[in-house]
């Protein structure tokens, strides 16, 4: 079999852990498999590099940031390759460029356009284990190094697995699979054997960082056999992320996600005239700001309040963009002390009463819901951040996800 394995930041967080990863790879190799291993930077490394840059500039060039951030993954790929080599295994490390990952030019958040697998194929044919520096590619237009957004090594692994038609893509992390919610918040969370691509995509997009959302999207598109498992307990089978039809009996609610990276923007007494919302959201879109949930209150005396949420990283850009409207509103405020809790499940499509249960759970804990939004398979609520963990646990309870 050809296996793509990915080892996250914690799994390669120390030199001993890199040695532990080498051991996992050796075992799989000894079983006769071909291996492409994708690695993250050592945990904390990417954040440290961002902090370094911010000591010189609050707005460093994205092009330089990519040069800087891509270095973290190169360190671990080389170290892991050296460790395996020392034990007599034939290996080669490769940067994103050597792997042949071609991307758009959107530095720090580039999209993969194509992968030229010839280099990898040749190297595997020569008997090498390939160790890939994750999270990076090279711009088709400029040949500069690019990165794929935070958590992007997951995407490197899935994209490579899809492009080279690997038999399986195993994402090794510090938990042994996908749980009904973050097991660090709710110790009663249950591990799932299988979860559908769509549900995993929602959970990941709504804050469950166990898999990067773009990697799940890619896995679905390319039909990659994706498994989430632990490098600390590699003997334990993980969770398979697969097509909905491969799951016999999906529960109504599969999981709860939490996202603390949220800011609620309140525009008070906006003139209630046609075109104002359009122009506000057009301005935000022009500044590349992703708006998530939106509510408008019923107008009184020709004025209405407008609330929406953005992610924490977009605060400064949003403040700047909203300057244009300061004469059209009475007040604008930014509340960072909020979070989003979400309930995800494909079964919601065909069952009623799911939402009311969630609202009741919040009411029982005296938690005020500030914004609600729903789609076919999810319900999201914005609440005060101080209730984040309590909300997750009570939702986990009402849907009996520990059963
Ligand atoms: P890595 O460094 O390996 O990429 P991450 O820190 O990005 O790992 O993701 C793993 C973490 O995701 C876990 O430690 C866990 O706290 C968190 N997590 C959030 N939601 C879930 C979930 N539903 N199931 C499992 N882990 C989750
Ligand atoms: N090192 C990068 C990050 O911290 C990419 C990754 O770990 O997947 O976001
Ligand atoms: Mg990750």
Image (cartoon, grey):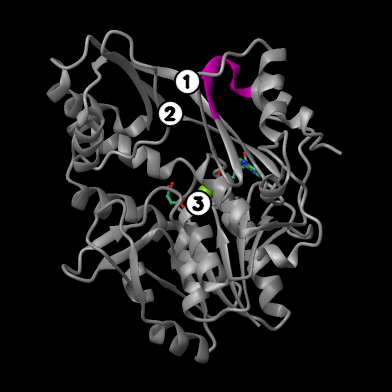
In the image, the segment drawn in magenta is 381-389
Q: Can residue 333 be seen in this snapshot?
A: no
| Disc on res. 58 | none
Q: Do the residues bearing badges 3 and 2 touch, measured as CB atoms within 8 Å? A: no
Depth check, mark 3 against mark 1: the one in front is 1
Question: Mark 2 or mark 3, which is nearer the start of the sequence?
Answer: 3
Percent from the top left, x then y, of residue 349?
66, 48
Percent from the top left, x then y, of residue 4?
57, 71
Q: Secondary structure at mark 3?
A: loop
- The residue that appears at 37% across and 30% down in the rendered structure is 312
**Could you classify mark 3 by the number of other residues whose Cα lies within 10 Å: few (under 14), some (14-19), or many (20 or more)?**
many
- The residue that appears at 76% across and 32% down in the rendered structure is 187
Q: Which residue bears the numbered disc 3?
A: 212
| Disc on res. 262 | 2
Q: Do the residues bearing badges 2 and 1 touch, measured as CB atoms within 8 Å? A: yes
Q: Secondary structure at mark 1?
A: strand
Q: Quadrant of residue 257?
A: top right
> 253 and 317: which one is in front?
253
Q: Quadrant of residue 273?
A: top left
- Mark 3 CB within 8 Å of ligand 3: yes
Q: Is residue 150 above or below residue 93?
A: above
Q: Which residue bears the numbered disc 1?
A: 338
Q: Which quadrant holds the N terminus?
A: bottom right
Q: Do the residues bearing badges 3 and 1 touch, measured as CB atoms within 8 Å? A: no
For the residues marked 3 and 2, what is the alpha-carbon distance in whole angstroms?
A: 17 Å
Counting every numbered tag in the picture gives 3
């Amino acid at each position: 079999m050809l296996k793509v394995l990915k080892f996250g930041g914690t799994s390669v967080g120390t030199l001993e852990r890199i040695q532990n990863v080498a051991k996992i790879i050796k075992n799989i190799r000894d079983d006769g498999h071909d291996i492409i291993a994708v690695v993250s930077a050592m945990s904390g490394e990417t954040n440290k590099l961002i902090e370094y840059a911010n000591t010189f500039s609050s707005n460093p060039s994205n092009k330089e940031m990519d040069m800087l951030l891509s270095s973290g993954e190169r360190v671990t790929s080389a170290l892991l390759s050296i460790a395996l080599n020392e034990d007599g295994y034939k290996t080669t490390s490769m940067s994103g460029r050597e792997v042949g990952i071609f991307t758009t030019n959107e530095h720090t958040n580039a999209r993969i356009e194509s992968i030229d697998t010839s280099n990898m194929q040749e190297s595997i044919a020569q008997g090498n284990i390939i160790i890939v520096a994750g999270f990076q590619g090279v711009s088709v237009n400029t040949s500069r190094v690019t990165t794929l957004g935070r958590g992007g090594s997951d995407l490197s692994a899935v994209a490579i697995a899809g492009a080279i038609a690997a038999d399986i893509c195993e994402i090794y992390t510090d938990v042994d699979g996908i749980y009904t919610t973050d097991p660090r918040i709710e110790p009663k969370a249950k591990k799932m054997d299988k979860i559908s691509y769509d549900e995993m995509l929602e959970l990941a997009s709504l804050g469950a960082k166990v898999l990067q959302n773009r990697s799940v999207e890619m896995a679905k598109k390319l039909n990659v056999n994706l498994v989430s498992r632990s490098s600390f307990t590699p003997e334990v089978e993980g969770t398979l992320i697969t097509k909905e039809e491969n799951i016999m009996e999906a529960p109504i609610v599969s999981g709860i996600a939490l996202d603390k990276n949220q800011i609620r923007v309140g525009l008070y007494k906006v003139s209630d005239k046609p075109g104002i919302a359009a122009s506000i959201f057009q301005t935000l879109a022009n500044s590349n700001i992703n708006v998530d949930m939106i509510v408008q209150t019923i107008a009184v005396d020709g004025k209405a309040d407008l609330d929406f949420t953005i992610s924490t990283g977009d605060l400064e850009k949003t403040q700047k963009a909203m300057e244009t409207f300061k004469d059209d509103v009475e007040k604008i405020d930014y509340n960072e002390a909020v979070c989003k809790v979400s309930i995800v499940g494909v079964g919601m499509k065909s069952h009623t009463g799911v939402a009311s249960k969630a609202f009741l759970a919040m009411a029982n804990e005296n938690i005020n819901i500030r914004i609600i939004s729903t789609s076919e398979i999810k319900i999201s609520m914005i609440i005060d951040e101080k209730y984040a963990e309590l909300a997750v646990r009570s939702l986990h309870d009402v849907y009996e996800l520990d059963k």
